[in-house]
Amino acid sequence: MHNYFITGGAGFIGSSLSKRLLEEGNKVIAIDNFCDFYNPKIKDNNVKELEQIDNFKLYRADIRDRQALKTIFEENNIDIVMHLAAMAGVRPSIENPVLYQEVNCMGTQNLLEEMKAHNVKNLVMASSSSVYGNCKEVPFREDMIVDFAISPYAATKKANEVMTHVYHKLFDFNVIMLRFFTVYGPKQRPDLAINKFTRLMLNNEEIPMFGDGSTSRDYTYIDDIVDGIIKSCNYTLNNKMFMKY
């Protein structure tokens, strides 16, 4: 049994991951700010059953709040951090880049500092396929140069990868970065395409098409994402001094 600290723990991926970890006998400490990016009641529903489980503890707080993070680390014996919390979405980041910088970069910096202060060195972090930008070569590879972001969201995710590498080098953090490709399945965020398409089809409404219809996109089912996260966590807990993408 391990103690997992999950940021963004009431979200789509975070709550799904928490459920699986609890079923496997682990303890989950979660933080989520329940912001209004989409209806916060969806997140309340995500964690409704989880909050009935003794091994689940939820803090309703923001990763930009350094004191809140400090309290969580002081009150819990954390073995590993799964960092999922972020402002998500490419298009909204263009409209409000400062907010994305504050949450995704400064929030992550706060987390890294509290991990350092409390000697917690195991980290699995959600990055994004958005860091690949307009890379023409496919399939994408982990060793590709991804220095040419085309959205504030992608830039913040790339910045997090770089900053976390600093903590790996200076403070011996064990890190795995997971560049998620659009995740779908039960509890999916309402702003994502498959959720929208399904709602429109159920209402017998037309699905709007942008561009000439030639674009394509990769999707990953939530159970496969959770499996990958747990395998990454297990690898991180059982190995020392590495950073992987």
Image (cartoon, helix red, strand yellow):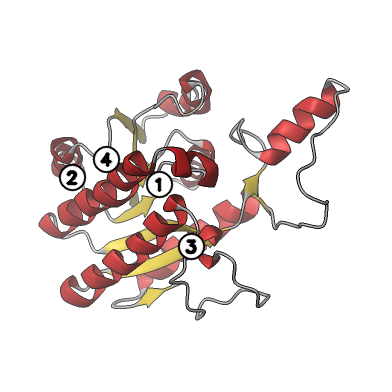
Which of 81/23 is in front?
Answer: 81
The residue carrying mark 4 is: 63
Describe the element under mark 4 as helix, strand or loop.
loop
Describe the element under mark 2 as helix, strand or loop.
helix
Can residue 1 be seen in the rendering of this structure? no
The residue carrying mark 2 is: 73
Q: Residue at x 32, y 47 (%)?
A: 101
Disc with the residue nearer the chain's start (1 vs 4): 1
The residue carrying mark 1 is: 26
Can residue 44 be seen in the rendering of this structure? yes
Q: Residue at x 82, y 57 (%)?
A: 214
Disc with the residue nearer the chain's start (2 vs 4): 4
Task: Please indicate whether residue 114 sits to the left or right of residue 183 in the image.
Answer: left
Q: Which marked residue is nearer to the observer: mark 2 or mark 4?
A: 4
Q: Amino acid at mark 3?
A: Leu
> Marks 2 and 4, Cα distance to the nearest angstrom?
12 Å
> Marks 1 and 2, Cα distance to the nearest angstrom?
17 Å
Q: Which marked residue is nearer to the observer: mark 1 or mark 4?
A: 4
Describe the element under mark 3 as helix, strand or loop.
strand
Which of 105/16 is in front?
Answer: 105
